[in-house]
């Protein structure tokens, strides 16, 4: 899935691809992976930025699914 994020050093949102979270898997482990992906992407886009936090991240949520999960389709 694609997560949008923005740092104060950026004029617009950026998108980073992250793996879907498996149903029932640990949300904290998944969030750590998302944070790492955003961190690597941001460092590549803005190598001189020294901000310690981003403005926001937008994680898409589908009806019938948990955070980071895809809804099951029948």
Image (cartoon, grey):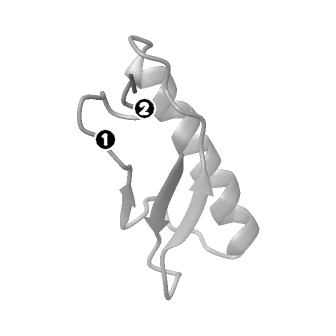
Q: In this view, does 35 lie to the left or right of 47?
A: left
Give how far across and how far down residue 44 sits, in percent.
75, 66
Q: Find numbered disc 1 in the image and state the secondary structure of the residue it sits on.
A: loop
Q: In this view, does 33 lie above or below 29?
A: below
Q: Residue at x 63, y 46 (%)?
A: 37
Give 51 or 60, whichever is nearer the viewer: 60
Residue farthest along the bottom direction in this orientation = 11
Residue farthest along the front direction in this orientation = 74
Give how far across and how far down residue 25 sits, in percent.
44, 13
**Quadrant in which residue 65 is drawn:** top left
Mark 1 surroundings within 10 Å by alpha-carbon count, few (fewer than 14), some (14 through 19), many (20 or more):
few
Q: Residue at x 30, y 27 (%)?
A: 66
Q: Do the residues labelled 2 and 1 touch (CB within 8 Å)?
A: yes
Q: Residue at x 44, y 78 (%)?
A: 8
Count of numbered labels shown in the rendering: 2
Give how far across and how far down residue 52 sits, in percent.
48, 59
Residue farthest along the left direction in this orientation = 63
Q: In this view, does 58 lie to the left or right of 40?
A: left
Q: How much space separates mark 2 and mark 1, taking CA atoms?
A: 7 Å
Residue 42 in view here: yes
**Residue that label 2 marks:** 70
Q: Is residue 35 above or below residue 12?
A: above
Of callouts 2 and 1, the N-terminal one: 1
Q: Find numbered disc 2 in the image and state the secondary structure of the residue it sits on.
A: loop
Q: In this view, does 63 lie above or below 74?
A: below
Q: Quadrant of the C terminus?
A: top left
Mark 2 surroundings within 10 Å by alpha-carbon count, few (fewer than 14), some (14 through 19), many (20 or more):
some
Give how far across and how far down residue 15 sits, in percent.
56, 64
Q: In this view, does 25 lie above or below 4?
A: above
**Quadrant in which residue 64 is drawn:** top left
**Residue that label 1 marks:** 62
Residue 47 in view here: no
């Amino acid at each position: 899935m694609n997560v949008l994020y923005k740092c104060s050093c950026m004029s617009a949102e950026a998108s980073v691809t992250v793996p879907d979270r498996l149903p029932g898997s640990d949300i904290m482990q998944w969030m750590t992976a998302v944070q790492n992906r955003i961190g690597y992407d941001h460092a590549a886009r803005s190598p001189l930025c020294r901000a310690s936090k981003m403005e926001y991240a937008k994680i898409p949520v589908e009806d019938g699914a948990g955070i980071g999960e895809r809804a099951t389709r029948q």
